[in-house]
Image (spheres, helix red, strand yellow):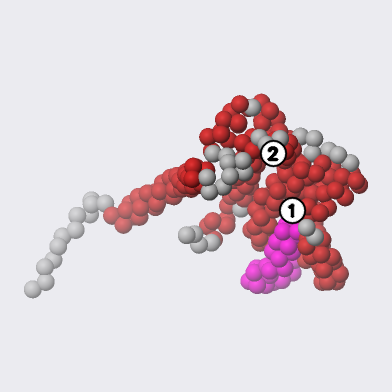
Amino acid sequence: MTEVRSVDPAAPAPAGGGSEAARAGRGAGLRAGAMLLPAAGLLVALAAWWLIARLQLVHPAALPPPGDVLTALVDKPAQMLEHTWATMLEILIGFALSAAAGVLIGLSLASSGTVERMFTPLLVAVNAVPKITLGPLLVVALGWGQKPILTMVFLLCFFPIVLSTATGLTTTPADLAELVRSWNASRWQAFRTVRFPAALPQIFVGLKVAMPLAAIGAVIGEFQAGEGGLGYVITQYAGVGDTATAWAAIMLVALVSILLYWALLLIERIALPWVRDTTSSR
């Protein structure tokens, strides 16, 4: 005999509330993980660094203990802040120039097969040249100061942006391209409403690849032509045997790179809110 259970109509439906609570819990867990996991990774790296220095697996003159690096950083706060600001400005200016030029060049390659076949080998050749070998030539051509440094940043950054822009603009989803054709839209309307927005996620991939390269380019440029900046600090203090201060400058370069990369991620999230809603997440 089948048992019939009565259902109280005033009882709340558990499915909706439960799923919302579960989603809220997962969101809180993800936010906590986003903060705690990088900190845990940093602690592991510092512990490994301390152990290597403690066991003297690397000569202390080449890799001083983390405590010595922190002391060097604390002893020269104003000087380090000034050089950090100089390097950050060079990174931002050079990255902005390479982003603007890279998007325009990528747009040109994507708009014409003739232009792509004509100039792609040249761009690949320029990107293949080891940029550090160009440092002395840039100093001779442009003199000391920011011009050769910004040029070095530009040379390191622009190719990933060109490649990602051209790839994004030439891989518009077929359904969107068919939709635009059904509207009888002009070429500009198709670019503005479909092709460029669809390419933005790919363009941001190139920008995120280029951002750490901008920091590398700024430091390389400061090695060769700098009158200030963290690269200048590294060469000056390493040359007189103060490797703790040199490593403090290296750590500041890494910190600046991380902060600028996170800023770029934030810009991407604000500029492309639909990406998270239309793609799968881990």
Q: Magenta includes 193?
A: no
Majority secondary structure in the magenta region? helix
Q: Amino acid at mark 2?
A: Ala
- For residue 230, say whether it is visible: no
* Residue positioned 89% across, 41% down in the render: 143
Camera-side residue: 139 or 183?
139
Camera-side residue: 98 or 13?
98
In the figure, is residue 255 to the left or right of 98? left
- For the residues labelled 1 and 2, the Cα–Cα distance comes to 27 Å
Residue 185 in the image: above or below residue 260: below
x and y percent of residue 106 in the render? 77, 61
Circle 1 sits on which residue? 157
Highlighted range, magenta:
159-186
In the figure, is residue 29 to the left or right of 143? left
Camera-side residue: 152 or 184?
152
Q: Amino acid at mark 1?
A: Cys
Image quadrant in which the N terminus is located: bottom left
x and y percent of residue 278 in the render? 54, 61
* Residue positioned 32% across, 53% down in the render: 18
Q: Quadrant of residue 233?
A: top right
Q: Which mark identifies residue 89?
A: none
Q: Which mark identifies residue 238?
A: 2
Q: Secondary structure at mark 2?
A: helix
x and y percent of residue 110 in the render? 78, 66
